[in-house]
Image (cartoon, rainbow, N blue to C red):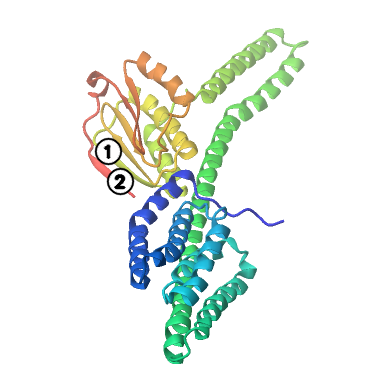
C-alpha cells in the first residue's frame, strides 16, 4: 500500500500560495496575453487561441492551491485541442504554450515511475502536431520545422524541467515541515518523560520506605508496641506528604526554579527547530520566581502543541516574564486550561496574567506589582540563540 504524500500545514500552504501568486502569476498572465496577441490576425483567432491561455492560467492557479488533480484533465484537453487548431487553421506557432504549461504542471499528478513516459508523450504530441503544419505549408520546410517543431519542443522540455525542479523544491519544504512536526512531538514526549521522572522521584523512594517501615512495625507489634505505633505514624505522615507532592506535580504547583525552567524551555524549543531568544533585564524575587516558572513551563508546552512557531522571545524582568511566539493560526484561540488555572493563582498572588493573539503572534505575560520585585538587584544580560 502506497503511503500518503506528505502535506503542508494549513498556514505554510497558505503562505506559499500567496508567495507563488504574487511572484509568478503576473508574469504568466503577461506571457499569455503577449503570445495570443502575436498570433492573432483576425478577431476569430482570439476565440480559437484564448481557451489555451485560459486553461494554462487555471492550471497554474490550481497548482499553487495544491488542487490541480480535479482540473488537470479538463485543462489538458482544452489546451491540447488548441495546439492542432492553431497549427492547421490559424497558423499560430505559439499556440503550443497552453499544452506546454498545462502538461508540465500536470506531471505532478502522474505517478513517479510513469513520469518519464508522460514527459515523452507530451514532447511527442507537441512535435508531431507541430509537424502537421507541413500538410498546409510545404513551401518553406525549414521555417515550419523551426517554428512549429523545434522551438515548441525545446521550450516544452525547458518548462517541464523547471516544473519538476519546482516540485522537488516543494518536496523539500514538505520534508522539512514533517521533520519540524516530529521534533515538536519529540519535545513534548521529552517533557512527558521528565514529568514521569519527577513522579518516580516522588513516589518511588516513598513506597520503598513505606514498605520497610510497615515490615518493621509488624515485627515490633509484639515486642515494642510504642515503637511500632511511632513507625506507623511516620508512615502515615510520609504517605500524606507524598500525596501532597503528587497533587502539586499533577497541577503544576510543585516549586520550580525559574532559571532551570528557562534553560529547559530553550532546550525544548531548540530540539523542535525553533529559534529562541532570552533577554534578562533583571532577576525576579524568590516568591514570584516560582509562579513565573510555572507560567513559562505551561506556555512552552502550549507553543509546542498548538503553534507552528519558528521563533520565540522570552523576556525576564524584575516584575514578570513575557513570552512571544509566532506561527499562530488566525482564528479562535485554543482552549488553554493550564493557563486558565494559572491565571487564578497569579491573580490570587497579586499579579496579572495576560494572554493575547495578534495576527500570527501570541503573547503570554505574567507581571507582579513592583513591591514583589524590589528585592533583587538588576542583572542585565542576554542569551540569544
Image spot of residue 353 (x, y percent): 35, 23
Q: How crowded is mark 2: few (under 14 residues within 10 Å), some or many (20 or more)?
A: few
Task: Determine which quarter of the picture holds residue 64.
Answer: bottom left
> To which residue does mark 1 refer?
280
Image spot of residue 80 (x, y percent): 53, 68
State whether residue 254 appears in this view. no
- Residue at the image position 26 percent from the left and 31 percent from the top: 317
- Residue at the image position 45 percent from the left and 65 percent from the top: 48
Front in this rendered view, residue 48 or 9: 48
Image spot of residue 104 (x, y percent): 50, 67
Task: Determine which quarter of the picture holds residue 279.
Answer: top left
Front in this rendered view, residue 332 or 372: 332
For marks 2 and 1, give the CA distance: 8 Å
> To which residue does mark 2 refer?
383
Looking at the image, the residue that sits furthest to the right is 222
Task: Determine which quarter of the picture holds residue 240.
Answer: top right
Residue 319 circle label: none
Describe residue 266's horizontal placement relative to residue 318 as left or right. right
User: Mark 2 near mark 1, Cβ–Cβ under 8 Å?
Assistant: yes
Q: Is residue 316 above or below residue 244?
A: below
Front in this rendered view, residue 36 or 319: 36
Under circle 2, the secondary element is: strand
State whether residue 379 appears in this view. yes
- Residue at the image position 76 percent from the left and 11 percent from the top: 223
Which quadrant would the N terminus be assigned to in this image?
bottom right
Amino acid at each position: 500500500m502506497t503511503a500518503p504524500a506528505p502535506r503542508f500545514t494549513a498556514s505554510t500552504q497558505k503562505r506559499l500560495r500567496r508567495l507563488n501568486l504574487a511572484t509568478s502569476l503576473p508574469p504568466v498572465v503577461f506571457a499569455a496575453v503577449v503570445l495570443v496577441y502575436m498570433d492573432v490576425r483576425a478577431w476569430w483567432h482570439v476565440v480559437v487561441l484564448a481557451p489555451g491561455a485560459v486553461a494554462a492560467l487555471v492550471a497554474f492557479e490550481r497548482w499553487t492551491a495544491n488542487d490541480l488533480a480535479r482540473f488537470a484533465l479538463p485543462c489538458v484537453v482544452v489546451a491540447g485541442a488548441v495546439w492542432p487548431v492553431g497549427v492547421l487553421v490559424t497558423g499560430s506557432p505559439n499556440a503550443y504554450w497552453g499544452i506546454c504549461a498545462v502538461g508540465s504542471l500536470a506531471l505532478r499528478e502522474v505517478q513517479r515511475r510513469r513520469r518519464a513516459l508522460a514527459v515523452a508523450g507530451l514532447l511527442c504530441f507537441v512535435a508531431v502536431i507541430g509537424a502537421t503544419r507541413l500538410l498546409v505549408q510545404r513551401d518553406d520546410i525549414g521555417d515550419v520545422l523551426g517554428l512549429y517543431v523545434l522551438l515548441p519542443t525545446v521550450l516544452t522540455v525547458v518548462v517541464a524541467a523547471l516544473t519538476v525542479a519546482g516540485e522537488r523544491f516543494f518536496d523539500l519544504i514538505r520534508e522539512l515541515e514533517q521533520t519540524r512536526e516530529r521534533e515538536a512531538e519529540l519535545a513534548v514526549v521529552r517533557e512527558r518523560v521528565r514529568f514521569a521522572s519527577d513522579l518516580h522521584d516522588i513516589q518511588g523512594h516513598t513506597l520503598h520506605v513505606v514498605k520497610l517501615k510497615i515490615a518493621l512495625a509488624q515485627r515490633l507489634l509484639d515486642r515494642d508496641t510504642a515503637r511500632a505505633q511511632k513507625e506507623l505514624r511516620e508512615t502515615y505522615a510520609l504517605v500524606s506528604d507524598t500525596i501532597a507532592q503528587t497533587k502539586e506535580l499533577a497541577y503544576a504547583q510543585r516549586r520550580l526554579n525559574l532559571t532551570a525552567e528557562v534553560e529547559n524551555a530553550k532546550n525544548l524549543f531548540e530540539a523542535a527547530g525553533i529559534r529562541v531568544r532570552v533577554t534578562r533585564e533583571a532577576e525576579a524575587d524568590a516568591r514570584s520566581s516560582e509562579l513565573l516558572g510555572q507560567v513559562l513551563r505551561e506556555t512552552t508546552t502550549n507553543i509546542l502543541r498548538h503553534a507552528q512557531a519558528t521563533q520565540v522571545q522570552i523576556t525576564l524582568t524584575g516584575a514578570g516574564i513575557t513570552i512571544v511566539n509566532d506561527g499562530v493560526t488566525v482564528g479562535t484561540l485554543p482552549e488553554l486550561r493550564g493557563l486558565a488555572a494559572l491565571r487564578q493563582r497569579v491573580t490570587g498572588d497579586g499579579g496579572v496574567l495576560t494572554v493575547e493573539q495578534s495576527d500570527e503572534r501570541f503573547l503570554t505575560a505574567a507581571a507582579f506589582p513592583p513591591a514583589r520585585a524590589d528585592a533583587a538587584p538588576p542583572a542585565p544580560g542576554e542569551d540569544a540563540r
